[in-house]
Image (cartoon, rainbow, N blue to C red):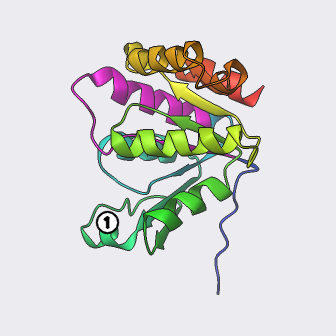
């Protein structure tokens, strides 16, 4: 007998670090976001890992009886980095397939604190919005000013004529996870 897993009508793809960082605020923000998404019936699509902020976020959604879809490349799964406790774990061939799969099914995107991978994923979906490849909202959770310098750089890009103001404003920013969800879902 085949068991079917129902998926929520609304899903947010969240990009975040495979590390927790030095400040516990980032972990707490990830947990708050996860609990609030589950409370609102919003499913999570994420990178499939059990480590760092990724693992904290997924576990928070699951702890609050939410739906979690993880998407992880086979090479990372082989290193035992996959979160076995999620609702659905998709093992894909490579990072390109991972990003495409995550983006395809998302109604919105959020980036939490992270490193190169998080930034690359964030900028890809913002660039796609700029190019009208999609029209879904993109949010940045700026916990404790983590992304302040990046936001200043984007403002400088507008001032220097490399980025249009309306494209800069495609990125919705909030310091509080609940406020960011409110802005993206409104």
User: Foreground: 62 or 131?
Assistant: 131
The picture places residue 170, in percent across and down from the top left corner, at: 67, 27
The picture places residue 143, in percent across and down from the top left corner, at: 42, 19
Q: Can you say whether 153 is above or below 129 in the image?
A: above
User: Foreground: 49 or 73?
Assistant: 73
Q: Residue at (53%, 20%) from the top-left corner?
A: 157
Whether residue 165 is visible: yes
Q: Residue at (49%, 46%) from the top-left corner?
A: 121
What is the quadrant of residue 115 in the picture?
top left
Q: Residue at (43%, 57%) from the top-left corner?
A: 48
In this rendering, the count of numbered labels is: 1
User: Foreground: 36 or 170?
Assistant: 170
User: Foreground: 177 or 156?
Assistant: 156
What is the quadrant of residue 42 in the picture?
top right
Q: Which residue matches tag 1?
A: 76
Q: Which residues are magenta?
A: 11-37
Whether residue 41 is visible: no
**Residue 54 is a magenta residue:** no
The picture places residue 109, in percent across and down from the top left corner, at: 61, 40
Q: Can you say whether 43 is above or below 23 in the image?
A: below
- Number of other residues with Cα within 10 Å of mark 1, as a class: few under 14, some 14 to 19, many 20 or more: some
What is the quadrant of residue 113 in the picture?
top left
| Left or right of 101 in this view: 148 | left
Considering the image in quadrants, where does the C terminus appear?
A: top right
Secondary structure beneath dot 1 equals helix
* Outermost residue, bottom side: 1
Considering the image in quadrants, where does the N terminus appear?
A: bottom right
* Outermost residue, front side: 161
Q: Can you say whether 173 is above or below 45 in the image?
A: above
Q: Residue at (37%, 73%) from the top-left corner?
A: 74
**Residue 30 is a magenta residue:** yes
């Amino acid at each position: 007998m085949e068991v079917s897993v129902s998926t929520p009508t609304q899903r947010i793809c969240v990009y975040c670090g495979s590390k927790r960082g030095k400040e516990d605020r980032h972990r707490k923000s990830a947990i708050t976001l996860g609990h609030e998404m589950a409370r609102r019936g919003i499913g999570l699509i994420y990178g499939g890992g059990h480590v760092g902020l990724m693992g904290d976020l997924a576990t928070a959604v699951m702890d609050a009886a939410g739906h979690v879809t993880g998407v992880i490349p086979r090479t990372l799964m082989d290193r035992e980095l996959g979160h076995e406790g999620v609702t659905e774990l998709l093992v894909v061939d490579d990072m390109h397939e991972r990003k495409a799969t995550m983006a395809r099914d998302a109604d919105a995107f959020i980036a939490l604190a992270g490193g190169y991978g998080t930034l690359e994923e964030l900028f890809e979906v913002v660039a796609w919005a700029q190019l009208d490849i999609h029209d879904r909202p993109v949010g940045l959770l700026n916990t404790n000013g983590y992304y302040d310098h990046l936001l200043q750089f984007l403002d400088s890009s507008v001032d220097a004529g490399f980025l249009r103001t309306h494209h800069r404003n495609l990125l919705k920013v909030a310091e509080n996870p609940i406020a960011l969800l409110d802005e993206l879902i409104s």
